[in-house]
Amino acid sequence: METKPLLSLRNIRKEFPGCLANDAVDLDVLPGEIHALLGENGAGKSTLVKMIYGVLKPDGGEMRWNGEAVQIASPSAARTLGVGMVFQHFSLFEALTVAENIALGIPSELAGPGLEDRIIEVSKSYGLPLDPYRGVHSLSVGERQRIEIVRCLLQHPKLLIMDEPTSVLTPQEADKLFETLGRLSSEGVAILYISHRLEEIRKLCHKATILRLGRVVSDCDPARETARSLAEMMMGSDLTSPEKDADKKVGEARFKVSNLTTSPADPFAVSLKNVSFELYNGEIFGVAGLAGNGQSELMDVLSGEELAASADVIVMEGQPAGRMGPEERRDLGLGFVPEERLGHGAVPDMTLWENGFLTAGRGQGLMNNGFIKTAKAKAFATAIVERFNVKTSGIEHFATSLSGGNLQKFIVGREIDQNPKVLIVLQPTWGVDAGSAAFIHQALMDLAAQGTAVLVISQDLDELFAVSDRIAVMSEGRLSESRPAGQTTVEQIGLLMGGLHQADQQEGHAA
Amino acid sequence: MIRLEPRETAPVWLSLSAPLTAVLAALLLCALLIMWTGASALEAYGLLFKGALGSRFAITETLTRATPMILTGLAAAIAFRAKLWNIGGEGQFYAGALAATWLGAGAITLPPYLMVPFLIGAGALAGGLLLLIPAILKNRLKVDEVVTTLLLNFIVLLFVNYLLEGPLKDPMSMGWPQAAPIIDEGVLPAILSKSRVHLGLVIAVVAAVLVWALMRFTVWGYEIRAVGYNAAAAGFAGIGVNKTIILTALLSGGLAGIAGVSEVAGTKGYLTLDLSPGFGYAGIAVAMLAALHPLAVVASAVFLSAIFVGADSMSRALNVPTYISDVIVATSVLAVLVSGMFTRFRLRFR
């Protein structure tokens, strides 16, 4: 007889304003199974596990636990059922000890006397060395993750959800974690495992459910797939190559990055390794790759929020710009559209016209002797609203009152209307409705047609195929060789990623 | 179910009526407290009003007391706009008063039309430089400015204490710890006869208008607001965030320093350790009550001053503790903060 699923979801639906995060999702997790949840950022993985852990409530569908219909109202209800979760970004108190941190996150009857001994017992038996008396501030990221895992294990979960656990670990720490997970699985604990790292999923997981745009596209046995075929399923292989063949790499490169390497202080950040590329007048260069592989870090260094190690790593029209701040780079004719509209691209609590002034004030002559030329600044914003069809009831309204797609059109429009020599955009249509996305794509192509060099960094292959002349792939901080987009297929994108992985392995052997 | 929904714009009538309603609500709440002490709330508020605004003398006293609070209120408002949490208004106030004393008690003599601006400039510089220390520590080392500005208050106060007991002690003071008086050329002249209201009030109101214009029409003001609302976006757009913090610190500390000059050269005439009954701290309440709007700071400072002045005479007559003034101020600030939510959001019942 077949084992009954521990958790089964049927037809789960979750809608956020303007975004269908999960639609008709079915999922079965068997006891003792390590089950991978795969998908690009925004595919709906996090939404799904948050519903299982009781953080979010599904809008429709059915959840069964051991065959019985359940409604998980809160994380504590989830924990009572036997669901534990290790989040990607931990929430620990640095000033407290390991044991104190654990005591804060578990039911009070478990947190009583003897907790330290129980922590030592659990950590020993699962190979998770952890000293309950140490202060958290002195621990490495891997050790901090162990606190979260031990905290879950103390409550004897039947299902453990892990959100990208290895993204912060060294390879050695990751191997240790896999041993622990194997041990748990053999004891009958089911594990729902979210990760971008296809190789480790192939090694570790018994089953994989692949999500794309909120829907399940495939259930498969990852051991029988290749990293490439998994990546294709995640990205969707129904894509066709664009009709583009003219080589636009003519003349001198306008913008040049050579051997850009970074070593970020933030343990969650990806370090860039020898990234080199050139941008030519009138072309759109697309950088593909799954999110979290160094794209935002690349944007930080290109925009000047983070400075490069030396000036000549980034050269704009022959001028070394690696040590310039954002203001100086904009003065050189660079324009940027960041990833987070509300966090980086706009000041939500200011009006729309003030947000237009934000990056255009200097270059567009909207100021005079330290005073804002209010009428001119408003005219600039009005022009963007009209040209880019931004739906708003007025430029005096707060930026935060616009819908995501409309604010994005405004931000992209603000940069395009300044006619930059080089425009660098990150995820230009993330979370934007299809109509606005098409509009933004057309605007980028029009800009390139006027001679601007455009760099589009995106994880959306449809988008890159729609606009790019050349495509390269980013993976784990490396950038591949570029290919003319017209001759590139999704398979070749997979190959480019594979090439990067080989380079990594060779380096590993040499070391 | 009740839901909060963001408004697209804050209508003018609401921005004006919400804080006024909030203050009324606060007065009603405090009426309960007054009645609890056994007094009649109506009588108490009547006496409070009379004590603060009931006579020419009362009004001029209220305005005299409001003068430094307008300036420290502006200091807090401009700093908080940039999310630079300057709790050190008290220290900057004394730094300004100290600079005025050091230069104005005989060290330098200029004709009055030069001496007064000179002392104000010196006091502003002293206050600004004092706040520069926490601002640089915040920029360079991410040291929390709430802690550094607050603790600097005590350092400055103890330093003033030392100076008043030692080097700056006036030999003519008959042993009291006070400094020599500001020379006549440096004194801020009275602007109303038979009252203590002096030129400082005019300076404070002009400062409020200037700060309002700065925030509204200039690039500097824009940058201060942008950094306060979203430093990440401001930095990404090319605004020098650290530079803006430094500028804000100089302006904010400078305004608090001018408050110190105004008190020492206008109201009192010489520096003592009790020159300020907490004007620096009161500035924070003034700014919050004004929702950080520079022009509203003037009204808010007069209101707070009226409460403080009026509560004195009320408590003498009715035996209600003067602490009630602090309670009224605190309740008003809380009520105005809540009312600020209603100008940004609307309630939806469904």
Image (spheres, helix red, strand yellow):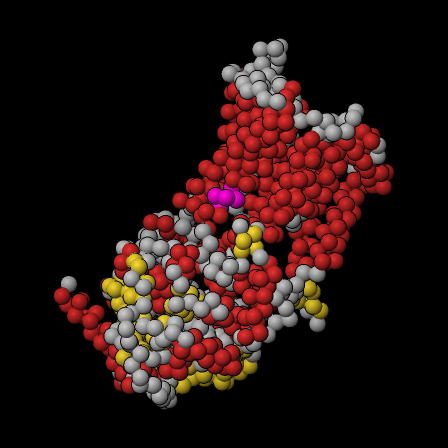
Residue depicted at x 53% and y 63%: A356
Percent from the top left, x then y, of residue B134? 47, 39
Q: Is residue B256 magenta?
A: no
The image quarter containing residue B346 is bottom right
Compared with residue B307, is residue A357 higher up or lower down, i.e. above or below?
below
Quadrant for the C terminus of chain B in the image: bottom right
Residue A84 is left or right of residue A269, and the answer is right
Report if residue A91 is visible in the image.
no
Q: Nearer the viewer, residue A373 or A458?
A: A373
Q: Nearer the viewer, residue A309 or A72?
A: A309
Residue depicted at x 61% and y 10%: B172
Compared with residue A124, is residue A283 higher up or lower down, i.e. above or below?
below
Residue B121 is left or right of residue A326, and the answer is right
Percent from the top left, x then y, of residue B272? 61, 22
Q: Main secondary structure of the magenta part?
A: helix
Q: Nearer the viewer, residue B71 or A38?
A: B71
Report if residue B277 is visible in the image.
yes
Percent from the top left, x then y, of residue A157? 41, 69
Percent from the top left, x then y, of residue A496? 26, 78
Quadrant for the N terminus of chain B in the image: bottom right
The image quarter containing residue A4 is bottom left
The image quarter containing residue B195 is top right
Q: Nearer the viewer, residue B142 or B119?
A: B119
Q: How many marks?
A: 0
Residue depicted at x 16% and y 70%: A506
Residue depicted at x 49% and y 46%: B245
Compared with residue B327, is residue A188 higher up or lower down, i.e. above or below?
below
Instruction: Please report the bounds of the magenta region as a residue range.
Output: B245-249
